[in-house]
Amino acid sequence: QVQLTESGGGSVQAGGSVKLSCVYSMKFDSNSCLGWFRQAPGKQRQVVALTSGGGGASYYGNIVEGRFTISLDSAKNTLYLDMNDLKVEDTAIYYCVADRLAPPVCRAGPVDAYFGNWGQGTQVTVSS
């Protein structure tokens, strides 16, 4: 069982920034698909950003609008999500995920059902 541990959530005002981290208990390779989903109260889970463990192009959900950046530090087994220009509607629990998916599948933005490994989630609250 893969362990995923998120950190970095908190409260911020609209327009501010937050950086999330997720430490994985496994080594990445080119067939690892890693990323972030989020879920707001009363809403469906949404994909935020995904990337392959071997690097290359990443996938961003429409909700990102160029404001977020996903990055990977393979040496530290850590995934990051830099979130800038945050909006009130970005308020949600953010989950990091992992599973073995070929790069083309990962870059296509698979839905949450493709991922069998989830972190416990970290709350991000954006106030106006």
Image: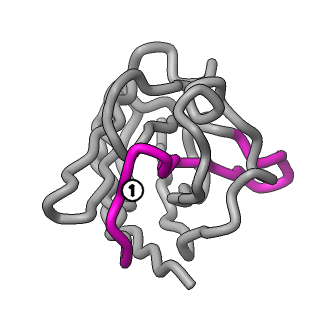
Left or right: 115 with respect to 91?
right
Of residues 120 and 29, the one drawn nearer to the viewer in this rendering: 29
Residue in the picture at 57% in, 85% down: 1
Mark 1, residue position: 11
Q: What x and y, as percent, mark residue 114?
A: 75, 51
Residue in the picture at 31% in, 59% down: 21
Of residues 20 and 54, the one drawn nearer to the viewer in this rendering: 54
User: According to the image, what is the colour scheme of the structure?
Assistant: one colour
Query: Start and end of the magenta stretch?
Result: 25-46
Q: What x and y, as percent, mark residue 23?
A: 32, 69
Furthest residue to the bottom? 1
Q: What x and y, as percent, mark residue 49?
A: 51, 35
Residue in the picture at 35% in, 58% down: 28
Asked if the magenta segment contains residue 111, the reply would be no
Q: Amino acid at mark 1?
A: Ser
Furthest residue to the top? 65
Q: What x and y, as percent, mark residue 104?
A: 59, 26
Left or right: 87 with respect to 117?
left
Asked if the magenta segment contains residue 28, the reply would be yes
Which picture quadrant has residue 56? top left
